[in-house]
Image: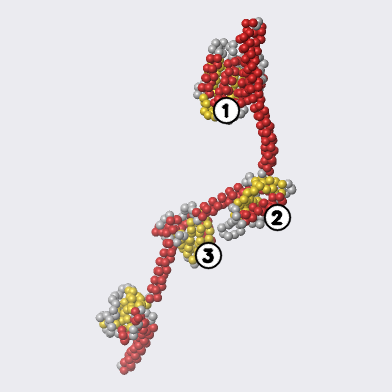
Amino acid sequence: MFETNRRLKAQLEEQIKALQACEAGFHNIIARSADGIVTIDRDGSIRFVNPAAEAIFDRKKEELLGKPFGFPVATGGATELEILQRGKKASIVEMRVVETEWQGSPAFVATLHDITDRKRREEQLRVTTDRLHSILGSITDAYYAVDSQWRLLEINPVAERVFQRPAAELLGKVLWDEYPQAVDLEFYRQFHIAVSEKKPVHFEAPSAISGRWYETHAYPRGAEMLEVFFRDITLRKSAEEALRESEERFRATFDQAAVGIAHLDLDGHWLRINQKLHDILGYREEELRKLTLADITHPEDLKKSLKSFQLLLNDVVRYTSLEKRYIRKDGSAVWVNVTVSKVSPTDGGNGYFVAVVEDISERKKAQEEVEVLNMNLAAHASELEAANRELEAFNYTVSHDLRKPLTIINGYCQAIRGQCGDRLDPECIRYLDETYEGTLRMNRLIDALLQFSHLTRGELNRGTVGLCGLAREVALKLSRAEPDRSVSFHITDGITVYGDKEMLRVALENLLGNAWKYTAGKEDAMIEFGVTEREGEPVYFVRDNGAGFDMADAEKMFIPFQRLPGSEKYEGHGIGLATVERIIKRHGGRVWAEGEPGKGATFYFNLG
């Protein structure tokens, strides 16, 4: 019995020691715990605090024990508390509560985990994230991010417009599944390089979605993320394309121009030369680049050439143009017109000259020929003036000196006939009448000669002329002069031209008079005046059914005093058609004739 009690006592002592050791270990754990541990009785008073809880509350346990806990106590989850420490410093703790006993009564144990640093980092992360979203929302570049499976993680508003879909529809989706048309494009190839080689890539390519051009920058972020920035450069690409086309047009214009074009530096060395200038000078490009502008300028023109360039160099003039001579490779001189302007770059670089060189050798030769021609014309004009003076003298002689004796003869013939006619025999009277008629014919010839000579002088008094009206006046005059003749006139209405009315009247008088004369003796005489068209231009004509003529003599009838064979029986002096030709020529036109013996004639004319 005694032995049994002893063993029980020993066992009890061991259990007490074990319990004490366990309690000591428990208190040691509680004391060393990083989390605060607070025991709260049913009345809400603090019954126990560990050192970590003292640090959280920033108070000693003597200040806490027996004091109200001050926070709602409830089991079943974590609760965040903000604890105000001394100096108004706050700690944020995560509290979890379990039920327990304290000195045989129900109580609660609250575990307080200080999450102040975590919350601070979370807030910093939130602020940073908000700032990032604000930046991504305000930048003009499109942005999106994908993970290693190409799932879209982030999209800014600009990228939404590029993808033509809102972020809500795209986030979490696989990029290449949503836009399979882009898999084979440069985008996909470059992104694969960025992901597989873990290095940034930069490229320009058109989008398979919109067709617009984008400048893209892709940056790997660790092994799980790829960030992509891209900017719309369509306008820049269009401008670059327009610039390229402009440069190509300039190059084509420069190289294929019909005049020589060159760029020279400010010292006169050749920078760029087109093919035409090589042709003008006879030098190859490598040969010309070894020379300056002064080296190929003719010595006699060098001074004025250097003076012009100096004015350009000093910005006195914007451009200069002069005629000068270059010395070709073969030693010959070539006349050119050179127009030079100075180009001053806006970026402050060196300026250069632009020279346009036109070969004027043929023009110079033509000018020399014109000068010789002008000299000849001046001499001819002097001769013509002398001839005109002689013609004036001749006209004076004809109208005064020649007409005066005719007038005397005419008067004597009439006086003899009147005073002695009854005493003269018939043959003498016939002689006297022939003499009188001769003076009349001579006077008419003098009048015709004077009129013919006046046609080449004086200004044309141009205006609107109704040729049909003039033709009717001439026809009426002819009919009244010989009322016994029966001639049918056909005159087309509405023929109007621009010219000298009085001269054109004279032309029609001669043409219609010529037709009247050569239809004499024709019972069904017909004279027609009308208009036709040849090569798109109006041509006027006078046609008759009279005697006609042989076409072999067509050119002779417009020569003054030239009468055709068989025309002797018709009255005339041989200058009527020559008069017509001069009038028509003065109007810038020409006159010609067609006919056949016995079948009439047609005279055509046009007016310039």
Residue drawn at (70%, 55%) of the image: 290
Mark 1 neighbour class, 10 Å CA radius: few under 14, some 14 to 19, many 20 or more:
some
In the visual, does 577 lie left or right of 333?
left
Q: How is the image coloured?
A: secondary structure
Q: Amino acid at mark 3?
A: Lys
Q: Nearer the viewer, mark 3 or mark 1?
A: 1
Task: For marks 3 and 1, give the CA distance.
Answer: 90 Å
Residue under label 3: 198
Asked which secondary structure carries label 2, the reply is loop
Q: Is residue 555 above or below residue 96?
A: above
Is residue 266 in view?
yes
Observer-nearest residue: 37 or 170?
A: 170
Which quadrant: the N terminus?
Answer: bottom left
Check if mark 3's residue and mark 1's residue have beta carbons within 8 Å.
Answer: no
Residue drawn at (31%, 81%) of the image: 39
Residue drawn at (71%, 50%) of the image: 300
Task: For marks 2 and 1, give the CA distance.
Answer: 62 Å
Q: Is residue 223 above or below residue 211?
A: below
What is the x, y in percent for residue 334? 70, 46
What is the x, y in percent for residue 549? 64, 17
Q: Earlier in the sequence, mark 3 or mark 1?
A: 3
Q: Earlier in the sequence, mark 2 or mark 1?
A: 2
Q: Which mark is residue 607?
A: 1
What is the x, y in percent for residue 522? 58, 11
In the visual, does 142 lie left or right of 550?
left
Q: Amino acid at mark 2?
A: Lys
Residue under label 2: 290
